[in-house]
Structures are given as C-alpha cells and as structure tokens.
Amino acid sequence: MVRAAEEDQNVNPGSGDESTTTNNDDKNSDMEMMKEKFAKLLLGEDMSGGGKGVSSALALSNAITNLAASVFGEQSRLEPMPPERQTRWRKEMDWLLSVTDHIVEFVATKQNTNGVNMEVMVTRQRSDLHMNIPALRKLDAMLIECLDNFKGDHEFTYASKNDNEAKSMKKREEDKWWLPTPKVPPDGLSDATRKWLQFQKDSVHQVLKAALAINAQILMEMEVPDSYTETLPKNGRASLGDFIYKSITVDHFDPDHFLTSMDLTTDHKIVDLKNRIEASVVIWKRKMSAKDGRSGWGSGVSLGKREQFEDRAETILLILKQRYPGIPQSTLEISKIENNRNVGHAILESYSRILESLAHKVLSRIEDVQHADALTQNPSSQSLKLNSLKDSLKIDASDFATWTKLWWKLWALDDRQHVSCGGGAEVSKGGTTSQYQELE
C-alpha cells in the first residue's frame, strides 16, 4: 500500500508537468503562428522582401477575407461549426482585430490637478471603430449561435450523393448542384419545427441587414480613387445609356417600376447596372462639387434637379444592395478596397462583408429546407415560388438611414441587454421587445 502510494506520488507530478508542458507548447505555437501572420502583413504579403507587397490596409483586408473563406467555406449545411474551426476563427480574428486597439484619436477631457480644472488631450480608440467593432463582434456571435442551434434532430436531414429520392427531387437552385439536398418527412415538417425554422431565418435576417448597413456606410466613407475616375466618361448620360438616363430623369420616378423594367435575370446584368449607376453618381458629384456649369444634364437643369436625380440613382443602388446581397462587388467597390490606405476602414469593411456573406449563406440554406417542405405540400407544382431572399430583404430605401440609427440605438444600451437567436428574440432592458421589433 505504501509502495503504491509512493508510485502514485511519482506519477502525478509527472502528469502535471506534462500538462503544463503541453500548455506551454500550445502558447509557443500560437505565438509563432501570430508572428508569422503579422510578418506577412508587415511585408504586404510579399515574403520575398522585394518590396512588391500591397498596402497594410489591403493586406489586413485580404487576411480577414482569406481566414473567413477557409473557416466558413465548407459550411454548406445547417449544422454547428466544428469546435476546432470555431476556436481558430475566434483566435485569429482576435489577432487581426487587435490592430484596431492602436488606431486612436485625440479628444479633449477635463482633468483636476491640485484643485485646478484643466482641459487636456488624451487618446482613445477612433470613434467609428469604437462603435462598429463591438457591434460586428455581436453579429458574429449571433451567427455562430444560430448555427449551434441546428445541432441534434430537427426533422430534416441531408441526402447522400447516391440517394435516388434526392436525385429526383426538384432543386430550388439548379446552378448550385454541389450543395447537399435537404430531406424532410413525407408529410412535411411539423408546425413547431416550421415556426422554429422561420424564427431562425428572421434572426439571421436581422444580422444580414445590420451587416449590410455597416458595410454600405464604410464603403461610402472610402475615398474614390483617381485611378477609377480617370476611366469614367465625360458625363453621366454616356455611362448610363439613353434608356436608363431617361428612366431616372422622368417627372414621376418610381424605383420599383424602374427595376421591373430592367433585365436583372443574372448576377452579371445586376452588377453591370450597378457599375453604370455608380459611375454616373461619381461623375455628377464631381461636377457639382466643382460647380462646373458644363454638366451632362445640360445647361437648363438646375442644381436642385441635379441633386434630385443623384438621390434617385443612390436610391436604386441601395435597393439593389438590399435585394441582391449575394452579387459580386462592383468595379467602384473593388477599386475603393484595393486603393484604400485607411487600416480602420479596411478592417471594418472586410469584417462586415464576410458576416454579410455568411448570413446570406445561412439564409439560403434555410430557404432550401423550407422549399423541400413546401414541395411535400404541393409536389405537383413545378413553378413553386417561396418568398425569395431578395423579396424578404425589401427595405424602403428612404427609411434605410432611419433603420440604421435604430440599430445603433439598440447596441448602445447597457451590457445587460442581449439579443438571442436561441429560444426567442429578447431584449432584457425594460422588459420589452419593442426596440427589437421596430427593426423590422
């Protein structure tokens, strides 16, 4: 007995040492990995040292984008993320976001020294980062939480590649043949599951709208690069074409009627329309700011009319962004990101963009399940149409700024407030959900 106890004492210290050694090894490994990542960022992704690297802002933007692609690229089903991927995502994002802690601005503050009130300048995190980074982190956590809610049995599964039933099932998106096909019971989902699934969709929808609002605001604040303006025509009409030009300058303008008159059947056509309108807006703004009388609208058009036409064009751009969140970036957006030198803007833009992309992906997967369920109710219908994602994302463009302010007001409440994607929408402060509901 004594000998056994002595052996245990000899073993236990050894096992503790091994655990400590393992933890130290993990920390050293993380430290080396972080050093390697930041070395690449400092060199502008050019590890050869040849001085051909990109700017620090673009390097950070690319790093966040590539990290998201490697972590979320395989998220093709409604299921929780593997723990190791979650750990990697949070750890490496913390590294990249730590850069924002050192982007500061000077602010005046009062200080009492020996009974004398003085106003001194102190540093604090830049205001846009101080407001947006916590909001994006919360949106990030809400998306991960929503994916975690799909663990276990929820009455639907995914068919294997050799499943004959799945092969005969009509898919909602034929061009995405690589995605797994959801399967529901022969009589469809239960009412409880349908309501729960719709609630998850509404929750992710809120995240998508918030990410869209942040991304749109950051892109708007980025400067238009000279390399982009040098490629533009002399006037907005040449960029738009006669048909779009006349449609925007009519006396009674209806953006919905305008969009129904356009061919938006493919992503390429949507992006082409967006490119034309964005180019025209840039041309008109430059002419108005320079107060150049030689305008593409003609000498008979007043400054007020020009501003009205510019507002119409920007309204169309907002609607396109809301209804088609999955389309590729426009030429102006790509040019802004590539030529941007503001590190804070680069981080906010890339972070909001990848959250927007992930939310759109989750919504699409939820719609796939809802479509499979709807087919069980009406299997003979070959032209079955659900409320598509672009219809569910319709937002009155005139209320876009108001909605964004409501979102920031929600996040500005104290730390006791929380919005949950689990059992229901909840805002603890005040005991009501009115502030959450008014975001709809």
Image: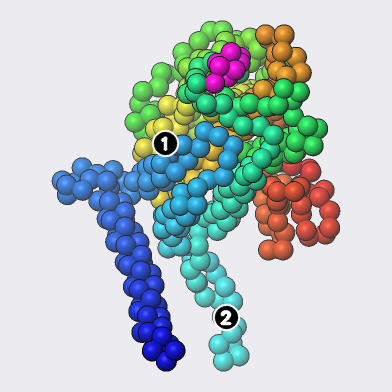
Q: Amino acid at mark 1?
A: Lys
* Residue topped by disc 1: 336
Question: Could you say which is closer to the camera, residue 322 or residue 247?
Answer: 322
Which label was assigned to residue 289? none
Q: Residue placed farthest to the front in the image? A: 1
Q: Nearer the viewer, residue 236 or 429?
A: 429
Extent of the magenta region? 163-171
Mark 2, residues whose alpha carbon is within 10 Å: few (<14), some, or many (≥20)? few
- The residue lying at 50 percent from left, 10 percent from top is 241
Q: Quadrant of the C terminus?
A: top right
Q: Is residue 167 magenta?
A: yes
**Residue 213, position as x, y percentages in the image:** 60, 40
Whether residue 116 is situated above or below residue 253 in the rendered picture = below
Q: Residue at x 42, y 36 (%)?
A: 336
The amino acid type found where label 2 is placed reads Gln
The residue depicted at 56 percent of the width and 53 percent of the height is 137
Residue in view at x 70 percent, y 48 percent: 422
